[in-house]
Image (cartoon, helix red, strand yellow):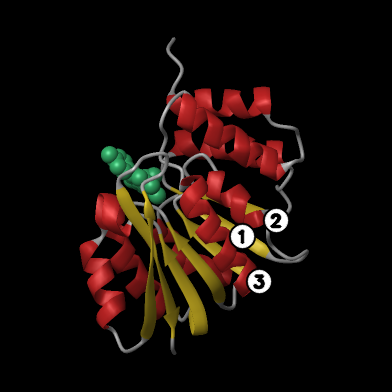
């Protein structure tokens, strides 16, 4: 039977990356996607912007919406302080199965909680189920139409505090125009656009960083 692209991406990690070395996992995926098969990871260019936001924030609790194969999950978790936690939600079971193995190859299982299910179902359960008090950083990289409703859900569930950061991928390509309008207009956010390119291409894309003002 035919393998899927995520399965081939995992194969490239297991072949070319060193177990327990997150940076080599990131590098192996970027090489695979640049030279073999494009895949929708945040990628190396936007990944550097993600790294700088994470490093500057030094978050204790991170929520990632949209795990895919775990590329950004590994990238973020490799920068977290010792007791920090990253919860990542993935709706697609096939993606979740691959991401779990990529995370294991990187040796980051202790920092990452991978949950298979919808953001609409799990965001309201963050506090009771994961003992999350507040979120320091939310990396949004799931279905682009869900960025806005999920942002409102995060607000309504009291998961954002003064200074919490929302970092959204793909605000240009594929785009999330309603989300962009909302965070840029709202007096409750200080928003900033980091211009970049769609992963592994020359097309414009970027990350929007929005600080919740409380
Ligand atoms: O849908 C996306 N993510 C949620 C599903 O897991 C996604 C899509 C694209 C993309 C695809 C097709 C194209 F032609 C251009 C962009 C890129 C991304 O970074 C993404 O995160
Ligand atoms: Mg993306």
Which circle's residue, 1 or 3, is located before the other in the chain? 3
The residue at 58%/59% (across/down) is 51
Disc 3 marks which residue? 58
Query: Are the residues tagged 1 and 2 within 8 Å (C-beta)?
Result: yes
Seen from this angle, which residue lies furthest top? 1
Above or below: residue 126 compared with residue 189: above
Q: Position of residue 114 (x, y in %)?
A: 58, 50
Distance, label 1 to label 2, CA atoms, is 6 Å
Mark 2 beta carbon near ligand 2 (under 8 Å): no
Question: Which x, y percent locates residue 147?
Answer: 33, 62
Work out which quarter of the rendered image holds the C terminus and state it: bottom left
Cα–Cα span, label 2 and label 3: 14 Å
- Nearer mark to the viewer, of 2 and 3: 3
Position of 30 relative to 191 (above/below) = above
Q: Element type at marker 2?
A: loop
Counting residues from the start of the chain, the first of labels 2 and 3 encountered is 3
- Mark 2 sits on what residue? 111
Dot 1 alpha-carbon crowd within 10 angstroms: few under 14, some 14 to 19, many 20 or more? many
**What residue sits right under mark 1 in the picture?**
86
Q: Tell us which disc is closer to us: 1 or 3.
A: 3
First-in-chain label (1 vs 2): 1
Which quadrant holds residue 52? bottom right
User: Which residue lies at the image location 76% right of the left edge and 66% below the top edge?
Assistant: 83
Determine if residue 98 is in view. Answer: no
- Relative to residue 98, is residue 150 drawn left or right? left
Secondary structure beneath label 3:
loop
Vertical order, 18 against 133 (above or below): above
- The answer to whether residue 66 of the structure is visible from this angle is yes
- Location of residue 169 (image quadrant): bottom left
Q: Which percent across, then down, holds residue 55?
A: 64, 67
């Amino acid at each position: 039977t035919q393998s899927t692209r995520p399965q081939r991406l995992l194969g490239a990690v297991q072949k070319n990356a060193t177990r327990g070395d997150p940076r080599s996992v990131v590098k192996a995926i970027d090489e695979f996607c640049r030279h073999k098969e494009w895949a929708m990871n945040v990628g190396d260019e936007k990944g550097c912007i993600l790294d700088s936001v994470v490093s500057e924030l030094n978050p204790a609790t991170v929520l990632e919406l949209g795990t895919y194969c775990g590329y950004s999950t590994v990238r973020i978790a490799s920068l977290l302080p010792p007791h920090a936690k990253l919860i990542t939600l993935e709706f697609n079971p096939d993606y979740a199965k691959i991401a779990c193995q990529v995370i294991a190859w990187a040796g980051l299982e202790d920092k990452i909680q991978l949950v298979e299910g919808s953001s609409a179902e799990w965001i309201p359960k963050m506090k009771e189920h994961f003992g999350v008090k507040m979120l320091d950083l939310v990396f949004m990289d799931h279905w682009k139409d869900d960025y806005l409703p999920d942002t409102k859900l995060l607000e309504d569930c009291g998961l954002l505090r003064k200074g919490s950061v929302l970092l959204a991928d793909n605000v240009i390509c594929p785009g999330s125009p309603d989300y962009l309008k909302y965070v840029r207009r709202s007096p409750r956010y200080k928003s900033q656009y980091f211009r970049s390119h769609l992963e592994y291409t020359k097309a414009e894309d970027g990350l929007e960083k929005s600080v919740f003002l409380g």
